Image: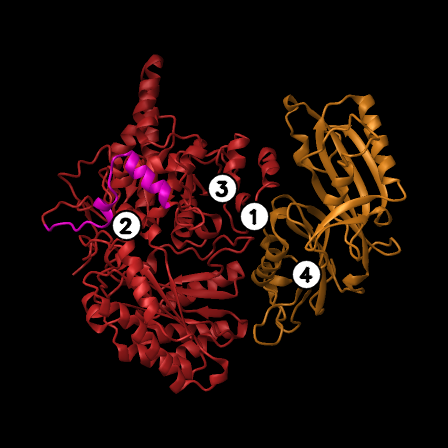
Chain colours: A red, B orange
Amino acid sequence: MEKIERILQKVQKPARYVGGEYNQTIKDKDKVKIRAALCFPDTYEIGMSNLGMRILYGIFNNIEDVWCERVFAPWPDMESQLRESNISLYGLESHDALSEFDIIAFSIGYELSYTNVLNMLDLAGIPVRSADRDESHPIVIAGGACCYNPEPLTDFIDLFVIGEGEEAAVELIDLFRSNKASQSKTEKQSKPNSQNKQIKREKQEFLKKASELAGIYVPSQNDVSTRVIQKRTVKDLDNAYFPTKTIVPSMSIVHDRAVLELFRGCIRGCKFCAAGHTGSPRRIRSPNVLIRQAMESIESSGYDEIALLSLSTSDYPYLDELCDGLLKWCEPKKINLSLPSLRADSFNVNLMRRVQSTRKSGLTFAPEAGTQRLRDYINKKITEDELLGACASAFAGGWNTIKLYFMLGLPSETNEDVTAIAELSHKVLDVWRDNTNNKKRGVRITVSTSCFIPKPHTPFEREPQISMNEYLKRVELLRKSIKSKQISYNWHSPEQGFVEAALSRADKKLGKVIETAWHMGARFDSWSEYFSLKTWLGAFSKCGIDPDEYATRKRTDSEELPWSFIVTRGACDE
Amino acid sequence: MSDVRNLSKVRVRYFKTGKAKYISHLDLQATMQRAFLRSGFTLKYSEGFNPHPHISVALPLPVGVESDCELMDIIIEKSNLNDKASGFGIDNFLPEGLTIQKAYQPMRKFSAIKWVEILCSAVCGNFGIINAEKIKETLNGRFGRKSLIIEKKSKSGIRSFDISGHIREISVQISKLGADANFAGLDMQNEKDGMDFVLTVRAKISAQEPTVNCNDIISIINLNEDKDCQDMPLFENFQFKRIEIYDKDMVLFT
């Protein structure tokens, strides 16, 4: 702690690195049998906003002989202080070095955090490659959305949990415990000089047995040419663990509010959407359970805002009933409800007015494409009338800020589809003129585009991404087509999207590229201030691999895909 | 602790030590607000477009500085205090390092605060007892000057500032490591590093109009253009703590 304190004087936002928040779990390390480090390869503010982290933290710590701590990626200023002072990356609760833990578990939600995974292992003095680790090192496991294509990480990760992790987490702990017990038994029976060999077996034995569990992929054990891995799915959300008594950070984080998870999965089937296709089937949590969880979360946290979380809030079948129940309890306590992820085709202005009685923040709709033809093709079946209707009622209801999200580079997109985005946003502006009660206040319409990234397990998994140049050409076409000054246009740079596209559909060979990029200094690639395309292109060329082979190449129907051994259709699908 | 149930404006005196010293002034308000809400207190919210609870902290405490004497005013609604909030037992609802000392009805405004007593402490290399005495003398000499100009960085650039009238009752101590119990963290320093002396400066500094801060004290300690002591080591890794606050007549402010 003293050594850590000294470097904390020299870094930004030291509260990220000390722990001590309300509701953190502290156990006696001499009394617990298994120590787990739950690692999130991004900053504290982002990791603490992640519901999956909070669920797993709660599940692990509910097991009596397990103490689970949190670890986040240190910002580069902290990284250099740690390295300079020779301090290992540590758990926030105990401040013990990561190498003292039994299990290191990464939650990996986006590809551009891969280099942070390697960096965190390295900061803990743990070899990044599984092959370079021995029985003295912790077992390194990974789960999260990225693990639906685990291949690029197989060099570094001992064991993957595919799909929803809450049940597998408990099974793995049980296996770890019993394996440890049976190994130490054989150890006692054997001769003292063979002790090393016995210890050596413990980790290998665990991985071997774990590879037989459902939804577990152990690259060193599972022969995926002969076996498929079915993802794990929690069937009954009402009885699944939900963290209502959870850590309240003492610094502001990205999602600084209580959350409710309305449902998992999605009924829509938009062809580009990885979350929708990997999260099936849709499973609903009952409104009465949600209302109870809301009350418990607010009471135990002291938050004054609660957000409804799902892939598409307006698809929750009991939304009115839920909001009525929540508002009855929230309004007198001045607790705000926030409803993200609304679809324009089921936008309910009365509901919005009720939940946002105090603050009228902007509204965001995601039509994704400009023409009906393309929207139909990608299966985002919202019509222009529905979108304009939603905008009309929003403007009439007093909103004057609307954001519209689109993707450029969707399969089959033509110039006409691109310019139609401009036409659509002009129509939204006309709708504002016809419906607003206050023209003097003006309107802010923001159009945003990003470059389409084909994702594994979606109907577009074999489609090419458009080149960065082509994307910029379409951006320019759209920019010129937007004539009104009341419409502003933001576009994401295609560079991060290009690397993400390559990593998303990577095979085993890209592990080398990730490691090389990390060696060349890549960190926090999801942060535009740290992302460097030059570094990544350098890493690809050093490894003799063409990134376009992965990002912009069309896969034929006969080509075997690296993730084809992972089955993401829900176990209880129709 | 007096029963505060029937009060509306409440002053809270609390410790902010250990891990809590890293909570920034801005984040502290939200942290306290949440602690009150989960303890069952209903805070009074401001009227207007974006209602927020009335919480006001006396003197912003820089990140990394500990304090034994923080003050904060809150307004709680008299009507609906629930049973959980009997007395003022919200300590169990606070993060590590924040501890309530007492709560009471305030008599004076925060603007009457003038002086704050602080402790600055740094571990330094072993330079022998004789040298230590000389360092102490030198520092006492510096702080005793009629005019003590330092450079202060502000938004408009660097400006000179005569700090002498704004520091009182300064005392310099150099002691063997372990003898000073004010900072638990310092006791544990490794002797192999050759760090076995602790420099402690205790002073009352002007809290507002003008504000003297802990770094101003360090800049005097490490005034390197000075010729008064040639062997003066550079003191680094200071730890700071607020001890007490006073009004303009040096009477304890409550």
Check contact, mark 4 vs mark 1: CB within 8 A.
no
| Mark in front: 2 vs 4 | 2
Residues marked 2 and 1 touching at CB (< 8 Å): no
Region of the chain picked out in magenta, as a range: A533-557
Residue that mark 4 sits on: B87
- Real-space CA distance between mark 2 and mark 3, rounded to the nearest whole angstrom: 25 Å
The residues tagged by marks 2 and 4 sit, at their Cα atoms, a distance apart of 59 Å
If you read the primary sequence from the N terminus, does the residue marked by circle 2 or circle 3 appear first?
3
At mark 3, the secondary structure is helix
The x and y percentages for residue A519 are: 38, 34
Q: CA distance from mark 4 to mark 1?
A: 34 Å
Amino acid carrying mark 4 in the image: Gly
Q: CA distance from mark 2 to mark 1?
A: 32 Å
The three-letter code of the residue at mark 3 reads Pro
Q: How many marks?
A: 4
Q: Looking at the picture, tell me which residue is in the foreground, A80 or A60.
A: A80
Relative image position of residue A97 (x, y in whole percent)? 48, 33
Residue A385 as seen in the image, left or right of residue B203: left
Residue picked out by circle 3: A76
Q: Give, as a three-letter code, the residue at label 2.
A: Ala
SS for callout 1 = loop
Q: Is residue A386 magenta?
A: no
